Image (spheres, rainbow, N blue to C red):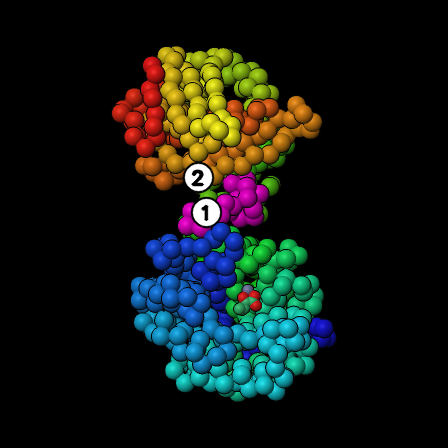
């Protein structure tokens, strides 16, 4: 369905690749990523700081809520020097009018009209003749152009459309005044070679009319969204539509951070970059993750927790000698805190000494060798040795005891006719034991509430995932929890593993709480953990009964 390549470069192409961010429109369409107006505004503010060229703020005709969110963003962010504020519209007068009204407050605004062009969509969805479709596209673009000077047109499902018909539609909308031709790979079907060839043909058409920009819009159903977008740039596209963290319909859209860093890291290859402030990428990823509740996979390129982490001993050694051995871009370039040498059982002395010294522990050779021996023993038991553990190893304060609160006992009752109730016994950092009981929505909730009753109500459980790490009836369940600190809003991750997943969950929760408290207290004393609120009167909603 995709035609042969025609090499062409668009006339009057801007000297950089414009980044059109659609996190608030296509991204928000992903399951569970719905955002409130306040959250959308927070994301839009950060996108402006990041330096995107266009913010697609929403689809105003989709709902009154969408329209008012687009309007709020147009009012606050749409100032002269800021990004263009864009709204999506179907090719109808009503949609275009609603969109124009919503984006009106922005100084620089854009209407984005879309209409499907593939025979599949025409036959099953639009049920019109090709001539009627061209007329609809022409008329909607002309309507938008009568009010707004910046109008984008997208032939939905372009990559599964007959290329000759697609080019006829595009020629018609150029005549009606479209200034950007966006080519969606709506169902993530194209391969990079096919997409590059198609974009080259569209560029050849666009080149006849000065000022018309060709744009990519790729979905990730086959994991090719970023590769296809970059292939489009190579063919002459000068706008890339993408989302933060790659969120979007089904498998998502091209990830903004990946497209941007590919262009910036490989300018030798692409010969063109963007105007994005790459140091804001990590922060933007976090803002979007926090506002949507969609977590970023640890191995996600550019913004994943492990994107700059090196665990293998040989890699760590190379990194310590020169970062260029295993890093093609610096963590600072994307606003990450710094590459992390994950300390685990594969780590060597050099890495441990370096981390301890960064934490402020400059140990004598004898003390260091003792700490290293204890580190290896601990690393055999724990997957990852964290800073809290290292502080204990370095001070030698509790040679054999894990740092922080320790879950000593957990007793849970639950069932079809029982209110889930948990009783926990925890040992505090000074060795004293504390017991509390709580009810909850389920056994895990009751256990976390009981732990809160002992350590203080310090954070909110935000995420919970279980996976089995071995096979059979004796399988170990590994639980990962995410707890958001009420004070700093930072999210702390905790892990626990046990044959009983409720126990694993309670262990994971205590692990996250210890990390949180350690971080809060690290300015005071690395080995001592305290909770503001610990031992204070309990939150009444928690129905907690402090027993000792
Ligand atoms: O994927 C798609 O086709 C779209 C259009 C509305 C641009 O998101
Ligand atoms: Zn899309």
Does 520 appear above or below 302? above
Does 397 appear above or below 115? above
The range drawn in magenta is 289-308
> Disc 2 designates what residue?
462
Residue located 56% across and 48% down the image: 301
Does 113 appear above or below 395? below
Q: Can residue 526 be seen from the camera position used here?
A: no
- Counting the numbered discs, the total is 2
Tell me the quadrant of the picture where the N terminus can be found. bottom right
Residue 306 colored magenta?
yes
From the viewer's perspective, is 338 left or right of 318? left
**Splitting the image into 4 quarters, where does residue 491 fall?**
top left
Image quadrant of ligand 2 equals: bottom right
Residue 250 colored magenta?
no
> Disc 1 designates what residue?
293
Label 2 vs 1, first from the N-terminus: 1
Question: Where residue 509 appears, x then y in whole percent?
Answer: 46, 29
Residue located 40% across and 27% down the image: 439
Label the magenta part by its dominant secondary structure. Answer: loop
Q: Can residue 124 be seen from the camera position used here?
A: yes
Looking at the rendered structure, the secondary structure element under dot 2 is strand
Question: Where residue 138 appears, x then y in whole percent?
Answer: 52, 85
From the viewer's perspective, is 506 left or right of 160? left
Query: Do callouts 2 and 1 mark residues in contact (Cβ within 8 Å)?
Result: yes
């Amino acid at each position: 369905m995709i035609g042969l390549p025609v090499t062409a470069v668009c006339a009057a192409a801007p000297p950089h690749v414009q980044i059109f961010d659609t996190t608030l429109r296509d991204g928000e369409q992903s399951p569970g990523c719905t955002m409130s107006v306040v959250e959308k505004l927070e994301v839009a503010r950060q996108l402006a700081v990041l330096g995107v060229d266009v913010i697609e703020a929403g689809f105003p005709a989709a709902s009154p809520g969408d329209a008012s969110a687009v309007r709020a963003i147009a009012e606050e962010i749409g100032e002269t020097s800021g990004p263009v504020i864009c709204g999506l519209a179907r090719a109808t007068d009503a949609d275009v009018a609603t969109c124009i009204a919503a984006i009106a407050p922005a100084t620089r605004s854009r209407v984005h009209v879309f209409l499907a062009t593939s025979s599949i969509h025409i036959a099953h969805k639009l049920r019109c003749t090709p001539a009627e479709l061209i007329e609809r596209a022409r008329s909607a673009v002309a309507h938008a152009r009568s009010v707004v000077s910046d109008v984008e047109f997208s032939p939905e499902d372009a990559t599964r459309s007959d290329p000759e018909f697609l080019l006829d539609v595009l020629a018609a909308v150029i005549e009606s005044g479209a200034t950007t031709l966006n080519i969606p790979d709506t169902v993530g079907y194209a391969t990079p070679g096919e997409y590059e060839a198609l974009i080259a043909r569209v560029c050849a058409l666009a080149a006849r009319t000065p000022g018309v920009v060709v744009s990519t819009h790729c979905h990730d159903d086959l994991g090719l969204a970023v590769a296809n977008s970059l292939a489009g740039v190579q063919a002459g596209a000068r706008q890339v539509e993408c989302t933060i963290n790659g969120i979007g319909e089904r498998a998502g859209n091209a990830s903004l951070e990946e497209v941007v860093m590919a262009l910036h890291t490989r300018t030798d290859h692409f010969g063109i970059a963007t105007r994005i402030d790459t140091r804001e990428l990590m922060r933007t990823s976090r803002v979007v993750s926090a506002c949507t509740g969609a977590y970023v996979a640890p191995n996600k390129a550019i913004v994943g927790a492990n994107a700059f982490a090196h665990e293998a001993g040989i890699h760590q050694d190379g990194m310590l000698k020169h970062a260029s051995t295993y890093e093609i871009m610096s963590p600072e370039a994307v606003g990450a805190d710094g590459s992390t040498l994950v300390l685990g059982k594969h780590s060597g002395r050099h890495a441990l000494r370096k981390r301890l010294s960064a934490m402020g522990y400059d140990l004598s050779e004898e003390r260091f060798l003792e700490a290293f021996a204890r580190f290896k023993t601990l690393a055999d038991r724990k997957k990852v040795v964290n800073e809290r553990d290292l502080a204990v190893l370095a001070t030698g304060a509790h040679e054999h005891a894990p740092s922080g609160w320790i879950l000593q006992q957990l007793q849970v009752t639950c069932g079809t006719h029982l209110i889930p109730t948990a009783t926990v016994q925890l040992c505090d950092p000074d060795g004293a034991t504390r017991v509390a009981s709580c009810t909850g929505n389920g056994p895990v909730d009751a256990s976390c509430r009981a732990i809160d009753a002992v350590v203080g109500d310090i954070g909110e459980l935000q995420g919970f995932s279980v996976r089995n790490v071995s096979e059979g009836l004796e399988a170990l369940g590994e639980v990962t929890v995410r707890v958001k600190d009420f004070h700093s809003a930072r999210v702390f991750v905790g892990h626990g593993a046990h044959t009983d997943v409720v126990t694993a969950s309670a262990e994971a929760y205590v692990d996250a709480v210890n990390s949180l408290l350690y971080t809060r207290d690290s300015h005071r004393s690395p080995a001592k953990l305290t909770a503001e609120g610990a031992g204070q009167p309990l939150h009444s909603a928690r129905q907690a009964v402090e027993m000792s």
